[in-house]
Image: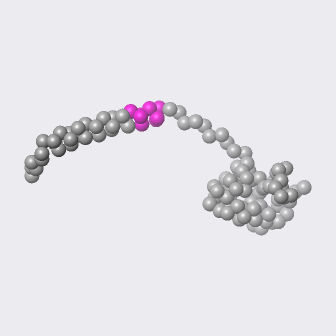
């Protein structure tokens, strides 16, 4: 099946095809260049705040604070305070442990080391 198209439309479509081919070549070159750049190392985190853990685990900060308070995850109180209460800090190792093993049994005294 052959369509007879107006000459100006044929010229436009031919130019469009050329432009698309040029863009494809440029994108391919950019892609190759980006693949050649080594990835920047991500600095290892030693600890996370309650809000950061909540975001990473798709939980509410209240839930993570309660886990800390009930000893369901290992956490420590930081020297930093907000509203008279020390803030919790959760280690990167504990985050990995939680991801592999889940919550610990409730043990309210686990994180209350003075």
Q: How is the image coloured?
A: one colour
In this view, which residue lies farthest toward the front? 8
Which segment did they paint magenta? 29-36
Coordinates of residue 73 in the picture (x, y in percent): 74, 60
Coordinates of residue 83 in the picture (x, y in percent): 83, 58
The mark tally for this picture is 0
Q: What residue is drawn where x is 75% and y is 65%?
A: 66
Asked if residue 16 lies left or right of residue 3, the reply is right
In this view, which residue lies farthest toward the bottom? 106
Q: Is residue 72 magenta?
A: no
Coordinates of residue 28 in the picture (x, y in percent): 37, 36
Q: Is residue 41 visible?
A: yes
Coordinates of residue 74 in the picture (x, y in percent): 77, 57
Q: Main secondary structure of the magenta part?
A: helix
In the image, 66 versus 71, the foreground residue is 66
In the image, 12 versus 48, the foreground residue is 12
Work out whether 36 lies above or below 85: above
Q: What residue is drawn where x is 9% and y is 52%?
A: 1
Q: What residue is drawn where x is 62% and y is 40%?
A: 42
Q: Quadrant of residue 50?
A: bottom right
Asked if residue 32 lies left or right of residue 41, the reply is left
Q: What residue is drawn where x is 46% and y is 35%?
A: 35
Asked if residue 91 lies left or right of residue 85, the reply is left
Q: Is residue 35 magenta?
A: yes
In the image, 69 versus 22, the foreground residue is 22
Pick the quarter of the image with the C terminus: bottom right
Asked if residue 18 lies left or right of residue 92, the reply is left
Q: Quadrant of residue 95?
A: bottom right
Q: Is residue 100 visible?
A: no
In the image, 87 versus 89, the foreground residue is 87
């Amino acid at each position: 099946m052959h369509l007879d198209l107006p000459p100006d439309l044929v010229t436009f479509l031919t130019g469009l095809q050329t432009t698309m081919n040029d863009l494809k070549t440029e994108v391919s070159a950019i892609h190759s260049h980006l693949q050649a750049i080594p990835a920047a190392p991500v600095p290892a985190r030693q600890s996370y705040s309650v809000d950061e853990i909540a975001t990473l685990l798709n939980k509410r900060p209240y839930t993570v604070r309660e886990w800390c308070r009930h000893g369901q995850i290992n956490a420590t109180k930081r020297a930093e305070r907000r509203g008279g209460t020390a803030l919790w800090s959760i280690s990167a190792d504990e985050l990995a442990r939680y991801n592999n093993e889940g919550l610990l049994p409730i043990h309210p005294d686990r994180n209350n080391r003075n």
